[in-house]
Amino acid sequence: MKLDLQEVAKILSSRWKGAGRMATGYSIDSRTIKPGQLFFAIKGPKFDGHDFVRAAMASGASGAVVCDDFLRWASGDLQPDLIAVRDTAEALENLACSVRRRWGGRLVGVTGSAGKTTTKEMTASLLSTRFSVLKSPGNLNNLFGLPQALLALEPVHDLAVVELAMSAPGEIARLARISEPDVGVVTNVAPVHLAFFDSVEGIAAAKRELIQNLSRERGDPTAVLNEDDSRVRKFREGFGGRVATFGMSPKADVRAEAIETLDGGGSSFRVRGNLMTGEFHLRLPGRHNVENALAALAVAGVFGVHADEAREALLSFGAMAQRNEVIVLPGGISLLNDSYNSNPRAMERMLETLAEWPGASRLIVVAGEMLELGKTSPELHRAVGRKMAAINADWLIAVRGDARFFVEGAVEAGLPRERALFFAGAAEAAEFCRKILEPGDVVLVKGSRGVHLEGVTQALAGAPAEMRKPE
């Protein structure tokens, strides 16, 4: 939302001494700032945005929000361009919350241990058939990213759909206070970020913060909950607003029946319930994506989107980069590129997808280390390794760090030792995988972001001209 800098300063309980200017956008990165954007100098553990204020101004920033201390020693020529505050991160949050309130529309917040980005994208796509929708771009889902997404709200938007992520207790509550969601969606609760939590129950409590902090400013709030997840199901207890559920359970308000896997990895399914009914097709692979679609369909039903509108939107929904991508290589080799991130639940669901792949000659798993699992990491990797053996994977190529425990679990569960190998890095794993590929193979590539398994995908896919995505 465009704002006069004098108005921005007033919202932030500060002063603007410069000439009349408008903020046409907002940024925390001086490297990508665009002319007219207001720069927030954020102090982080590895950087200090105040070191780049002058660079931001040279790139055309309309002004900069800085800490009080910076104003005291900033050069005289720079001072008129500055809005001084006690804490720049807090100022970013406060301005975003003010813009959200000024906009005044209904906002959908999506969280969960897995599938939240895909669910957010699907939800926005379905709602866009009837409304003008702002969605948080990419994964702008934390205390720095979410405010930037909210600052893009404009009067033309009827609804907003944003993603809320966390790595510690209290973060989702804080994000909810900033964004004031009216509708809260929880996809699931699973063992992720256990380096920061003492149990899965602790993770559930953190995810529940979204439901506990739904706004009542614009009417009764709505909680959209996964009926199949016993922890999420409990979030309705003590909640005073409307509850809409999704899942495979016959008790769900939006439930899937007669799920069939299609050639190329998509799905067809029938939806029943009091919010949405009909036959639907999804181009993304796996039963877990049907669950994500059910969550999006539940939200669409809450907002009165017709089944025919939702059906067309879901049919046209495609994979995002490095998430649920299906790339067909020469020789009929199918590459499942899900290399953006990983956790035990997400990995197991993709293994189930791999096991159900139509017409596969051999199943090859390239599995990167799953990060942020704390002291539980070795056993969680072993458990997923056992799952790899259970789906009858033909090859396991484990990459980096604790991924070696994938190998231990898989061999323990019966995968031949000579077909379960560990590599220290993605480059070596990619080279080996290329050597063993045969026509008709299906290859799953999945690992945590820090393992950089996108390098494996790029190596296997080769030059862009040599690959094609299925229609």
Image: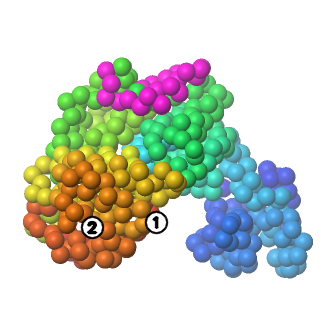
Whether residue 260 appears in this view of the structure is yes
The magenta segment is 228-250
Pick whichever of labels 1 and 2 is earlier in the sequence.
2
Rendered position, 417 above or below 166: below
Residue at (38, 46) in percent of width and height? 345
Does residue 389 appear left or right of residue 255 in this picture?
left
Closer to us: 137 or 309: 137
Location of the C terminus (image quadrant): bottom left
> Which residue has dot 1 on it?
450
Q: Tell me the tag on residue 421.
A: 2
Dot 2 surroundings within 10 Å: few (below 14), some, or many (20 or more)?
A: many
Rendered position, 107 above or below 168: above
Q: Position of residue 144 (x, y in %)?
A: 63, 57
Residue at (49, 35) in percent of width and height? 185
Closer to us: 388 or 156: 388
Residue at (17, 75) in percent of width and height? 435
Mark closer to the observer (1, 2): 2
* Residue kind at label 2, given as amino acid type: Leu
**Residue 103: which quarter of the image?**
top right
Q: Position of residue 419 (x, y in %)?
A: 20, 64
Residue 442 counted in the magenta span: no
